[in-house]
Image: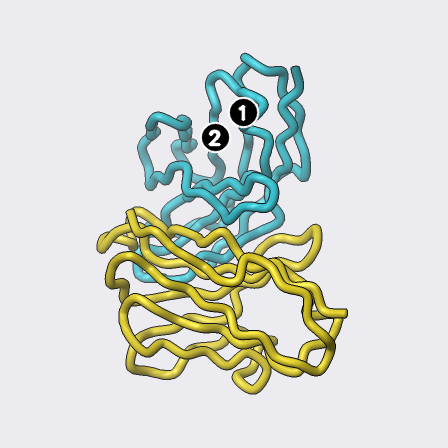
Chain colours: A yellow, B cyan
Amino acid sequence: SAVISQKPSRDICQRGTSLTIQCQVDSQVTMMFWYRQQPGQSLTLIATANQGSEATYESGFVIDKFPISRPNLTFSTLTVSNMSPEDSSIYLCSVERSPAAEVFGYTFGSGTRLTVV
Amino acid sequence: DAKTTQPPSMDCAEGRAANLPCNHSTISGNEYVYWYRQIHSQGPQYIIHGLKNNETNEMASLIITEDRKSSTLILPHATLRDTAVYYCIVRGRNTDKLIFGTGTRLQVFP
């Protein structure tokens, strides 16, 4: 199944700044997903990123706050913009485990632990 | 997407079977049941999935009731490393997204 490298693994940022998180996959995948996991909570889907088109955002998430790039089939970035302490979370990317993702589900990166001070 | 209901927490003795229930009473005919787990500070890990029949792999067994309204994940011989949050997710064949519920926090004790 696909192997994901996510960077950075953790960061501490000042409020008002932005952080870009990278997700690199060792194989070509059609869809990439970005999730947020707030402290002690479950995972919440932020958006779906397809190569060659704009990301599709879930309710409660907007492009101005979480711009996403998907320049090719193995790479994506998520930017957390104008950060506040409420953005302190773990951010994870996810991709298909295999081309037959509709059956076999998804693989997740190890996450980026963001603390905003 | 169909919703799932899981108990918030469970305990299991090391070496014993851990049986994690999940209710998905509104599941539709083409929706699969997936199980993932998240060990502390790691990304979720795929465990198993099923449609109608019971399934078994090297990690676990999945028992789906005949009416498909509930299922049970079985870890046959739980170890301390199985301590994690376990998520039951229902996902349609043509739906790309995985929507996570609150999961069950399984604590395996010595």
Do tag 1 and tag 2 residues touch (Cβ < 8 Å)? yes
Q: In x, y percent, where is residue A1? A: 29, 47
Quarter assignment of residue A77: bottom left
Q: In x, y percent, where is residue B17? A: 52, 17
Chain bearing mark 1: B
The image's mark for residue A25 is: none
**Residue drawn 39% across the image and 32% down it:** B66
Q: Distance between the residues labelled 1 and 2?
A: 6 Å
Amino acid identity at mark 1: Asn
Amino acid identity at mark 2: Leu
Left or right: B60 as drawn, with respect to A104: right
**Residue drawn 62% across the image and 48% down it:** B102
Q: What element carries label 2?
A: strand
Quarter assignment of residue A88: bottom right
Q: Do labels 1 and 2 share a chain?
A: yes
Q: Name the residue under label 1.
A: B19
Q: Name the residue under label 2.
A: B73
Q: In x, y percent, where is residue A107? A: 39, 51
Left or right: B110 as drawn, with respect to B20: right
